[in-house]
């Protein structure tokens, strides 16, 4: 039921069962999954949703790269 929505920003669950943790981490369609934890994410952590909850990431190196356009330049030689 958790994946039956068009959104996927974050998912939270609480359990001590190792097999349930692995199954939920692998099975939940969300950009962030918190296990036994309710606090927000660090500002330097890449964070982003999936489905209709966003495109790309913010925070961390991946967040910075989402605002960049890389360009490879070849064969310039010297242009003193």
Image (cartoon, rainbow, N blue to C red):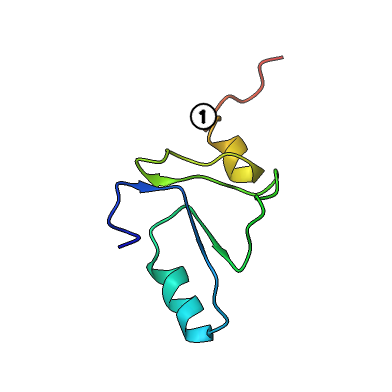
Q: Residue furthest top?
A: 80
In this view of the protein, which residue sits in the foreground, 30 or 59?
30
Which of the 4 image quarters holds residue 39? bottom right
- Vertical side of 59 occupied by 11: above or below: below
Residue under the point 62% across and 25% down: 77
Q: Is residue 1 above or below residue 47?
A: below
The residue nearer to you, when weighing 73 against 54, is: 54
Total residue callouts: 1
Q: Position of residue 24 (x, y in %)?
A: 43, 72
Quadrant housing residue 26: bottom left
- State the image coordinates of residue 20 (x, y, percent, origin top left): 46, 80
Q: Residue at x 60, y 47 (%)?
A: 46
Question: Which residue shows up at 42% across the image and 38% down it?
Answer: 55
**x and y percentages locating residue 62 in the rendered image:** 58, 44
Q: Is residue 45 above or below residue 69?
A: below
Name the residue: 58% across, 24% down: 76
Q: Name the image quarter holding the C terminus.
A: top right
Q: Residues within 10 Å of mark 1 (few under 14, many from 20)?
A: few
* Helix, strand or loop at mark 1: loop
* Horizontal side, residue 57 vs residue 27: left or right: right
In the image, 4: left or right of 62? Answer: left
> Image quadrant for the N terminus?
bottom left
Disc 1 target residue: 69
Give the image location of residue 17, x and y in percent.
53, 85
Which of 61/49 is in front? 49
């Amino acid at each position: 039921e958790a994946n039956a929505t068009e959104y996927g920003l974050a998912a939270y669950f609480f359990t001590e069962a190792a097999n349930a943790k692995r199954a939920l981490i692998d099975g939940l369609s969300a950009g962030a999954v918190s296990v036994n934890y309710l606090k927000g994410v660090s500002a330097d952590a890449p964070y982003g949703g999936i489905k209709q909850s966003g495109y790309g990431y913010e925070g961390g190196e991946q967040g910075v790269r989402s605002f960049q356009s890389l360009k490879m330049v070849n064969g310039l030689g010297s242009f003193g």
